[in-house]
Image (cartoon, rainbow, N blue to C red):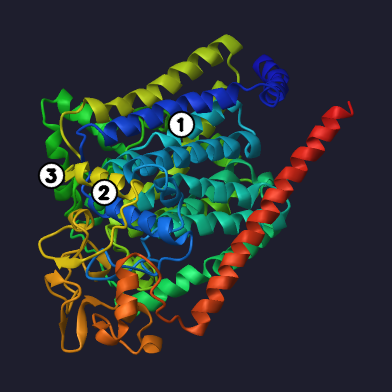
Amino acid sequence: MVREKISSIRQPYWHKIRGKNLGPFIFLLINLFFIGLIGILYLLRDYPMVGADYREAIPLFLDISTFFRKNGLSIQWYTPAFGGGFPVFPDPISGQYSLITLLTLIFHPLQAIAITAIIDIGIGLGAVYYLLSNLLKLHWKAGILGAIFFSANGFIMERLAVGHYVYLIFPVMVVLIVLLMESRLSWGMAGLALALVITVMIHQAGYFSLVLFGLSLLMTIPILYIYNPALFSWRRFISVASLGGGLALVLCASKLSAVYSFMRFFPRQVEDFYAASLAAGLLGIIFQLLGAMNLIPLIKLIGGNAADLEKYMVVISRAPFGYWEFDMSMSPVVFAILSAGFYQFIRRPREQIQRYTRNKRWLAWIFLVFFTWLTIEFTLAKGLVYPSLEKLPVLSSMHVNVRFAAAFILPLAVTAAIIYNRWSSNLSNRKAWLIFMTVDILTLLPLSIYLLSKTDLAARDYNVTESQQIYNLIRSGDPMTITGIGSAMDNTDAMLYHMSNLQPYEPIFGYALQNFHPEVHAGSIWEASGGYYNMTNPSGYVFPEVNSTRPFERIPVSQINELETFASYKQPGWKLPLYQQVLDRVSGVSVLVVASILAGAAVWKLVKRAQRKGSR
């Protein structure tokens, strides 16, 4: 009874000082610094060798940067640099209008990707803290720790190290949950912001992250409801989701239409099949979430080799991937807190069940169990529901399903923060600070495993030296005009030697380019044969009907001006269908209008706040 009275007195004080000091903000910045620092050091641990997928990412953003420098921020429909002529904007993973691309106008793409990763992690940190502290009304220390539990994970570390730039926007998904739940923000403004965030994610090729958001949301919302049903206004929730989702389709209509026009010819239908049993698959997911931060110390403790982690995961899950695909590691502290919470539950099961099932909470438990199972099915690529969903658009083009295990990171972090908050709420101020600092440090400390381990878990076989030379050429004003088609060249070599290549990196055509059948050959692009130049007309991949062409067809000799323009990174003037022209304008204007409304509302709020302070 005495403890409850002390807690009731202390809690208002905590909430009072939270709004008046910069303590939480400073702690978020400090933790962001350490998480970002470890991420960058892990990325650069074998510099100039970096992760294999930077072989695709760095030339792509160098190419887009070259186009922007010559044409402004107009749409780059095609590039002459890869594959004898390729689509760019219609490619779902191009990321033309992403933060990475804009930063590449100032920095080398590797630096731009690293900066973007830190910004995205910072947004995720802030969003989780806001969700826990401002919406769930947890103590700010629990909110800080929950944000760290979420952000200090192996999924982001490995994506940054290996070059999976499309997944770096994963932490931003928490902003969407905040917008759906923040009742102090009008549903209209929340809907506008939701649409704009989704648009940003899609333009950074964040399709997979949006699916992860959906799975995370479906598990996190029941947890939040079980903790406090009063948080939810379902009418507002549905209104924001409806407005934001519908408006996002308008904002992204240009991109989605272009992607569809390309992928109708190359749908990239892929399917994962893992032969592991259900029990082995569940064990594999647990090992994924334990990941490098937990398993490497354990392996070292028993005298094993960290290099065997990949072999163990392949044997358990029967998924033939490198370890970086499996690693969703969360800090051991998270699992210690979850274990302690589970122990407290089984000590007084009747009391806990009564507490967390009243007021229709039992319905939330049903949804939580179902959506957890659904996420397990997505991760294992099998089950009762998943086979009916995997043929749907977008999902049918995704594979490496083991990545879906990342959807568990947010609900586990939120649950751990709630358990910590309940346990620490009755502590004295001195003990609360001591334990908070200890847990904070112990949560971050395991990230050092990524730096201390001598085993390379990220397949670092791409040398960035040549890409730095290309970047210097672009900055010095080199026109980067393409003069020929080269054989046995990757995308970086092609750009360096002002060539296009016959062996591009483009997953749309298959990882072995099994669906890529170019009619060009090694030699000058001006070499003519059969009435065609030696350069593909890339409009045939996307809009062949209005350009009287077909996929892989070369540029006819009658289009000498188009070839010269295209080879010099300028707009060749190939036709767009009327619907695409309309959607380009509608999406462009809509993005500007929505961004202006949100910016204007933010400025107006700041002005009103300043006026209120001035009148005191």
- Quickly name the residue at label 1: 148
Secondary structure beneath dot 2 equals: helix
Spatial distance from mark 3 to mark 2, Cα to Cα?
37 Å
Report if residue 420 is visible in the image: no
225 vs 471, left or right, is right
Residue in the picture at 34% in, 50% down: 477
Instruction: Kindly identify the residue that appears in the image at 16 percent across and 49 percent down.
Output: 314
Question: What separation in Å lies between label 3 and label 1 (alpha carbons)?
Answer: 30 Å
Q: Looking at the image, do the residues carrying marks 3 and 1 touch, with CB atoms under 8 Å apart? A: no
Residue 112 appears in which quarter of the rendering? top left
Q: Nearer the viewer, mark 2 or mark 1?
A: 2
Q: Percent position (x, y) of residue 37? A: 37, 28
Q: Residue furthest right?
A: 615
- Per the rendering, the mark at residue 311 is 3
Q: Residues within 10 Å of mark 2 (few under 14, many from 20)?
A: many
What amino acid is at disc 1?
A: Ile
Camera-near label (3 vs 1) is 1
**Distance Cα–Cα, label 2 vs label 1:** 38 Å
| Residue 159 tag number | none
Q: Percent x, y for residue 39?
A: 34, 33
Position of the C terminus by quadrant: top right
Q: Quadrant of residue 108?
A: top left
Disc 1 element: helix
Side (left or right) of 301 relative to 32: left
The residue depicted at 57 percent of the width and 68 percent of the height is 587
Task: State if disc 1 and disc 2 touch (CB < 8 Å).
Answer: no
Label 2 sits on residue: 470
